[in-house]
Amino acid sequence: MIEIRWDWILNHLDDVVDKTWQHLILLLIPMVVGFAIAFALAILAMRRPGTVGPVTAVTGLLYTIPSLAAFAVLIPITGLTLMTAIIPLTTYTLLILYVNTVAGLRSVPPEVNEAADAMGYTHTSRLLRVQLPLAVPLIMAGVRVAAVTTIGLVTVSAIIGGQLFGGLGQFITEGLQTDFDTKIYLGAMGSVVLAFLVDGALVTLQRWLTPWARARSEVP
Amino acid sequence: MEQMIAFLTDPANWQDQAGIPNRLIEHLTISLLAVACASAIALALGFYIGHTGKLQLLGINLANIGRAVPSYAVMVMLLPVMLGLAPVLGYDPQIGLRFLPIFLAMLFLAVPPILVATYAGIQQVDRDLTESSRGMGMTERQILTRVELPLASAVIVGGFRVALLQVIATATIGAFLAGGGLGRYIVDGIALRDNGMLYAGVLLVAGLAIGTDVLLSWLQRRLTPRGVRLATESSPTTAELA
Amino acid sequence: MRSTRRLALGASILASLAIAGTAGGGAIVTAQDQPTVVVGSDAFYESVLAAEIYAQALEAEGYPVDRAGLAIGARPARLAAFESGQINLMPEYIGFGLEFFTRGTDASEEIAAIETSGNAEADAQSLQSVFDALDYNATVLGVSAGQDTNAAVVRPDTAEEFGLSAMSDLAAVQDELRFGLPPECEANAPCRGALEDAYGITWPPAQLSALPACGAEIAGALEGNAIDVAWLCSTQPIIAQNGWIVLADDLETQPPGNLAPVISNELLDQIDGGADSVAAILDPISAQLTTDVLTELGVRIAVDQEDPEDVAAEFLAGLSE
C-alpha cells in the first residue's frame, strides 16, 4: 500500500540536511527570542504581580490564533521571507514559556528567599543565583513543550510558504503535489524524529543544569 | 479589516450549512469529541499512574509521543490508511476522508495535557491525607474518588483547558481534507485570497477558544477547595508541570 | 535552495564575471548588471516545472534567479504575490488567467466583455489588453504550444452506474454524486462558472468535499471512494494509470490552458532590451513545450518522482542539441 523508496532518500540526503537545518533555524530563533521576551516579562511579574493577568491574557490570545491563518495573514506584510514564519512561531511560544517561568520563579519557597535576603543577596543576585536555578525544572518543562510544539508548527508553515520555509514540512507538501509517499513520510516521520531528538537533548540539558535533582525521581 | 466586518455582517454568511453558526457548531463538536475521547484514555491512565505511582515511565513517554507528532503530518499520513480501512471496517469512506485523519491527530494532541495533569494532580495530594484515609479503612478506590480526585480536580480541569485550547486551534487544519468547522473560512480564505473571510475565521476561532477557556477557568476556580492554596495561579499550563 | 544549486549559481556568476572581465564589456550579459528575477508558480508540479524551466533558461543567460515564490499556492495567492511585487515572473495558463479576470465578480464592464476565443495566441493578446486596462504592469510573453486543462474525472464504476460520458450528464444525477473540488473553484470561472452556468450544477453541490487542486489528496479521495467526481488537471498521469474516465467537456467550457510567462514591467525596465531580450530567451523554449512534452515531463515528475530541477535541466539541454 505504502512504498518507501530508500534509494530516493539516499540520493537526496543534501536536500534532507538542508530542510532539517531550516527546520532547526525556525525552531531556534523563535525559542531564543520567545524565551528572552517571556523571561523579561516573568521578571516583571515578580516585581509587579498585577501584570501576570494581562500578560497571560495577551499571550493566550496570541496562542489562540490558528497557526495557518497567522502565516497567511503575514505574507502580504512581511513578504516572502523567513520573518513571515518566525513572527508567529515566536508568539506561540510566549504563553507557555511565560507561564512556566513565572510558576518556576514562584515555586521557590518563601523561606529560601528570606534566607537569601538574610545572607545579604541583592535582588538581582538572588534572582540569578537562588531563584533561577531552583526554577529550572518548571522552566524546562515549558521549554520542552514549546520546542516540540514549535517543531510541529513549522511543518504547518510549509503549506503557505511554498519553498521558502516549512523545513521538513516541505517534503510533505511536495509529496502531496506529486503523490509521492516517500517524501510525505520522510517529512512527517522526520518531524517526529526531530521532535524526539530535541526533547531528549533538552532533558539532558535539564539534568546538566540541576545536578542536585538527580537523586530524586523528578517527573519531567 | 473592513472586509472582515463586511463578511461578518453579511446575512448570507449566517445561514445554511456554510453559515457561521453551523460551522461554529461543527468546530465545537469535533473539538469536544476529541477531548472527550482523549479523556477516556488519559483519565483512566492518569488515575492509575497518579494513585499507584506505577507505569510512570509509560505515562511520560505517551505524553511525549503525543506532543511530538505534528498534527498536519499525522493527518496527511493517516489519510490513505483511513481510506484504505473503510471497506475493511465497513465505514463510509467520506468519514475516512474528512473526519478520521484530523480527529486522530487531535486525539494525539489532547491526550498529553490531560494525562500529565491527571497524574501530576493526584500525585501532589498530600501523602499524609491518603495515608490517614487508608488508616481509617477506606478502600483504594474510595481514596481515589473521595480524597485524591476532589483535591486534584482543579489541576485536572487545567489539563482540559490546555487540551481544548490546542484542539480548537488544530481543528482548523482539518479543512484541508474537506473538513468543516471554522477552519473552512481560513483555508478557503487563503485559497480565494479573500481576506475578509480569512480574518473572520481567525476571529471566530480565537473567540471560540477564549470563550471555552474562560468557561473552564471559572470551573477550575469553583473546583479549588477553599482553604487549599495552589502554589501558582490557576493558569492553563501549570497543569503541564510536574 | 539545494546546496548543489547554490554552488551552480555561484559558479555561473563567477564564470559570467570572468567572461565579462575578459570581453570588451557591454556585449556579454553579466550577473552584476542584471536585476534579480524572482520566479513564482502555483502549488502544482506542472506549474513548478514551467517556472523552473524559465528560471534555468534565464540563469543560463546570466540572470540571477530567486526561486522564493515557487509553489506559493493557488492562482489567487500567486497573483497577489505578483501584484505586490514579491514575485516578478510566473507561468500563467492563458485561457484560465484570462477568464479569472474577465469573469471575476469585480470585473469592469469593459473587461467582462472580453471573450475567450479558444485560440491561444488571440487569448494571450486579450490577456495583455486586460493587464493594460487594469494597470497591472505585466507583459505576456510567447505562448507555449502545449496546454493543460481541467478535467472532471470519475471512476469507471461510477460512469457505468450513472451513465456518464460527458459533463452534461452530471446535472441529472447530481444529488447522488459526491464532488471533489478545490477551494478556489468558487473564484474560478472555468470551474464554478462552467459547472453552474453551463452544466446546471447547483452551487454549492449538495455533497462537496473541498480538496487541494490536482494533488494526492483529491486523487486519493477518488481512489478511496470518498468522492465520485474529482476536478483534476488533464495532464495528471494518475488518470491514465487508474483507468479513470475523463468526462467530455461537450459544451466547451474550458478555455485553452496554454502556458506563457508573465513578467512584470518593473523587471523589464531594469533589463537591457526589455521584453525583447527576455522573449528572445523564453519564446523559443515555449514553442517546444507541446502538450506531449508537458505530459511526458509530467510523467517523469509525478510518476517517476524525478525532481523538477533535473527534468527542467535535461529538457533545456535537449533543446540546445
Image (tube, coloured by chain):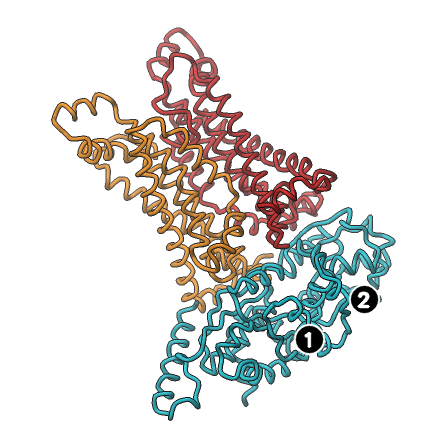
Please give the letter of the chain rendered in cyan.
C
Quarter of the N terminus of chain C within the rendering: bottom left
Q: As displayed, is residue C116 above or below residue B117?
A: below
Q: Which residue is mark 2?
A: C248
Q: Chain of mark 2?
A: C
Q: Colour of chain A?
A: orange
Q: Position of residue B195 (x, y in %)?
A: 60, 50
Query: Are the residues flagged by discs 2 and 1 from a single subunit?
Result: yes
Q: As displayed, is residue C38 above or below residue B235?
A: below
Identified at 36% across, 46% down, the residue is A31
Q: Colour of chain B?
A: red
Q: As displayed, is residue B53 above or below residue A101?
A: above
Q: Position of residue B136 (x, y in %)?
A: 39, 6
Disc 2 packing (10 Å; few <14; some 14–19; many ≥20): some
Tell which circle, 2 or 1, labels the residue nearer the N-terminal end: 1
Q: Nearer the viewer, residue A203 or A94?
A: A94
Q: Which residue is mark 1?
A: C124
